[in-house]
Image (spheres, helix red, strand yellow):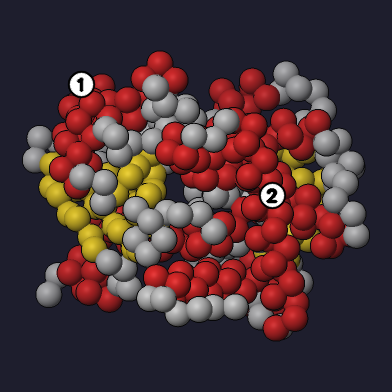
Amino acid sequence: MSTMETQIQDWNGESVIVRKDAPTGSWIFIAVHSSTLGAATGGTRMRQYSDHTTALHDALRLAEGMTRKFAVAGFPRGGGKAVISIPEELSPDARTDLLLRYGGIIGQLGGYFYTGPDVGTTSEDMDLIARHGAPYVHSCTPACGGAGSSGAATALGVFTGIQVMCKHLFGDDSLRQRRVLVQGAGSVGTALIEHLRQAGADVIVSEIDQQVVRQLKTQPELRFVPTEKALETECDILAPCAMGGLFSAQTIPNLRCRAIVGGANNQLATTEDAIRLKQRGIAYAPDYVVNFGGAMAITGIEALGWTNDEANRQVVRTVRTALSQVLSIAEESGVSTEAAAAQLAKQRLNKHDKEQAGVVTS
């Protein structure tokens, strides 16, 4: 049995669609973890990987995270994720053609999986995918009838999570003069920086793209640290908003923060790292408890008819409630916040299953 087959066999999700894109040599993995709460929904990630089995692993883990994300939020969608593993940087024409072919796959699935932007894709890319994948594509540009980027709504949820964490740690949710390090200044990180700046926080930024750094340096109140020093910089709140897998047995001993609340997916290298953070006395907001704002808002606007204001209110209310519950469960049970969040998600999935079966739950 191949490594890919073993990964899929060992996975606890529903199904995996695997396609080889012959013209580009890319591999496409669409992982549907759960459709218990509704149609599986998740972004499309496109990037180069060290090998295609790593890309598959990413898709499987991210899809499970989406299931937990929607379950914790109490939102009627299931968990899925798509990863397009490209062997090299593609020419603009080759990339466009790949996205059009991928859109055809989404269309053929007929609503089994809904998608939107993720790392390596944009709302403009969703416009291309939607040519053959509509109506199962979210976050197209407004010019194509979509709600646009989900970054602002994700950032709003993370900002709300930071407020909740400050209330938990310091007794009030004021961010004035709190040191918050934002690691990654993409669409989520940049919007988060603005929320923090307006709230009076002492904002520290770490970003690898020097063009972005130059743009941000026009705001004199921001401070900057090199990317290799970000995790070792002293701060109250560390907000990872780039790639996942940051916190591991190697990096956790060097952290100098009081808490972690960020927008990146799969921030822990392993589940054991949640225990390592707890042992170090670092409060951790599980990523899927605070970063579901984008998925929730865009889906709500495009599928449920919410206004932008209503979407923002729902994001703030839901993140505040969910993270408060997770922190309370962890404190009362003596478990890590990661375990508490998984417990909350499982409870909500089980409750839905029982209700569907006609079993009355309290």
Callout 2, which amino acid?
Arg
Extreme-left residue of the structure: 22
Q: Secondary structure at mark 2?
A: helix
**In the figure, 313 relative to 81: above or below?**
above
Q: At 71% across and 23% down in the image, what residue appears?
A: 217
Q: At 27% across and 66% down in the image, what residue appears?
A: 14
Q: Quadrant of the C terminus?
A: bottom right
**In the figure, 351 relative to 172: above or below?**
below
Measure the alpha-carbon separation of dots 1 and 2: 43 Å
Sequence-first tag of 1 and 2: 1
Q: Quadrant of residue 315?
A: top right
Is residue 344 visible from the viewing direction of this image?
yes
Q: Which mark is residue 93?
A: 1
In front: 306, or 58? 306
Q: At 29% across and 34% down in the image, what residue appears?
A: 135
Q: Secondary structure at mark 1?
A: helix
Q: At 27% across and 33% down in the image, what residue appears?
A: 134
Residue 153's spot in the image, x, y percent?
59, 37
Extreme-bottom residue of the structure: 333
Q: For mark 2, what is the residue?
A: 317
Mark 1 Cα within 10 Å, few/some/many (few <14, many 20+)? Answer: few
Residue 6's spot in the image, x, y percent?
21, 73
Q: Quadrant of the N terminus?
A: bottom left
Callout 1, which amino acid?
Asp
In front: 167, or 205? 167
